[in-house]
Amino acid sequence: MIKTELSFLNFSIDLGNLYFQVDNIDSFLRFSNCYLFRNAGSTAINSHSLVVVNRGSLILGNLNIIGNNHGGNQPLFQSSPKLIQFTSLTVSNIALVSGSTAQLLLNVTELEQQSQITLSDVRVNKSTAGCQAQAGIIFVHASENHSQSKLKEYNPQQILIKNSTINNRSPQNNNNAYEIKFILPYRSISQNLIDQFQIVEFGLTFNHVAVRVLPSEQFDYLIIPLGAKYTNIQVNSKGQEQCISYIANYYNDIQSVLCAVIIIREQDSLGLFKGSPRSVSTTGSYTENDFRTDGIDVSFAGQVSYTASNKITFQPNLPISTDSIDSSLFRIHDGGLVTLTRLYIQRSNISGSENAPIALIINGIEQQSNGVGQLVINNCVLEGGNSVSSDVWYNLGLAETCNVGYGAAIVADGQTIVQIFRSNIRTFEGPVVRALNGASVFIDRYTILDNNGLRNRNTLSSMQTNVVCEGGIGTTTINIALDNVTSFTSTYNAWIYQSSESSCDINATYYGTLGQPRSFPQKNSAKVTIDNTNKTAEVTVGGKFLEPCLRKLVLEIHEKDSTDKQIINIS
């Protein structure tokens, strides 16, 4: 074939059963703003290839190829080209006959060193090659005539795909469901191809690009970065997409928050969006038990309405192990950040659920920590399952009753940060926060703490626990405003505990002035009854805030109107 330059502009071409063929390296064929079809649209557009380029160049611009779902068995374009250039190409509803493994769009059998493939603004949508596991969109086989001395001449810049959408899988099929397949020369570095995909949307499935480097017979998948829209996941309890494992890169209309968390965790493990903040927006009501994102930066946001129709019920798997690290709803560690905004979360009142905190922030899980774990709660309602009929504290002895860290809503352990703003945290069986080993806790003046840690059906029934500082390694810091702590506004007792042996730095304020974290015992009456026969004494003391947990109450008995010969000290 002699050198030919052939261009079609603004044509409708009925090819019948014919196709174009380019055999000269200096020849080119160009289509722009054309409509191509076969036999008035009654024959599959891919019953034959539209163009076969044995040498030379093929240039397509502003071209729509619509298949009407007629089944064919050939790639639309076959080539061993000098140049392939597709710009503003849309391919839709192209079907392959059952059993066909042909590439849907382009089959490049010999890509020479001087060859170039550029695909820009290409859209392959709603085609049905996906029903055949091996039938991808594009296949590129680089020439094997690269001597070892010329290997350095091969470079992935020969191929560029940008600003394109290749969302072919209909129905979705993750079984060897590549969209683009490369065979590269000996000693090529397949990872270098990743940068040649610039803003390419592959749809929900993964393993889109498969690469084999000769002489290997094994294809490996390239992990191509996803678009920015995948960082923001929309969850709706009436959504259509479901998962209990990582089966697709869903980002919209997901039915459960757990599915969104599974996707985020697996994408992070693959290096996708590494270090980038992720977000989950929720609408509806859910019953869940695992939102543990560990070292990832994730924000969870709900609706403005704090009603049963927009609520997350935390129902832990029972029985709960003694280690709460595996049972909390949220888990953050070593550089992870979780932000909760406008969420209504209620912990189950089923017996045993109080062992599982809503959130656990822990430091030192990773051997090489990237920073401290952080939890930020903003404008949320967190609710426990404690009530006047609860059995958690029923008829327990003093030692069990004084386990003040039990049943906490949030546990901060190690070099961690908890910040709570404009929220309502209420009716938990234990404290709002249990902090130890150098944690830092901040609770602002607009946050309501209400009836937490009430020892219902217990001798110390009026006792509460709002915050517990257990000290441990390092200095644990608590900064809390008592303006909306209901126990303080009603009885001036904030019920903030710290062990006398612990390293705690507690700063409590009430409308800007210093407040007392925990009220001192106050006695207003005392009565001693001595039984000389049995040599026993009964002491009754009346007053307020006499509970003995994490402190020592000392009773001294003096004989009235007599000089002390001996002081009886009872602790």
Image (cartoon, helix red, strand yellow):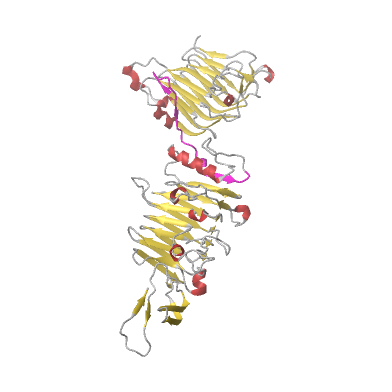
**183 versus 367 height, above or below:** above
Q: Nearer the viewer, residue 208 or 336?
A: 336
Q: Where is residue 247 drawn, in percent x and y?
A: 53, 35
Q: Where is residue 95 drawn, in percent x and y?
A: 62, 23
Q: Nearer the viewer, residue 536 or 231?
A: 536
Q: Residue reaching furthest bottom?
A: 561
Q: Where is residue 402 drawn, in percent x and y?
A: 44, 64
Q: Tell me the magenta residue range.
A: 212-238
**121 versus 132 height, above or below:** below
Q: Nearer the viewer, residue 554 or 46?
A: 554
Does the segment drawn in magenta span residue 208? no
**10 versus 311 height, above or below:** above
Query: Which residue is pictured at 39% across the width and 73% down the height?
Result: 553
Q: Where is residue 170 drawn, in percent x and y?
A: 60, 29
Q: Quadrant of the C terminus?
A: bottom left
Query: Which residue is pictured at 45% across the width and 38% down the height?
Result: 272
Determine the image quadrant of residue 21: top right
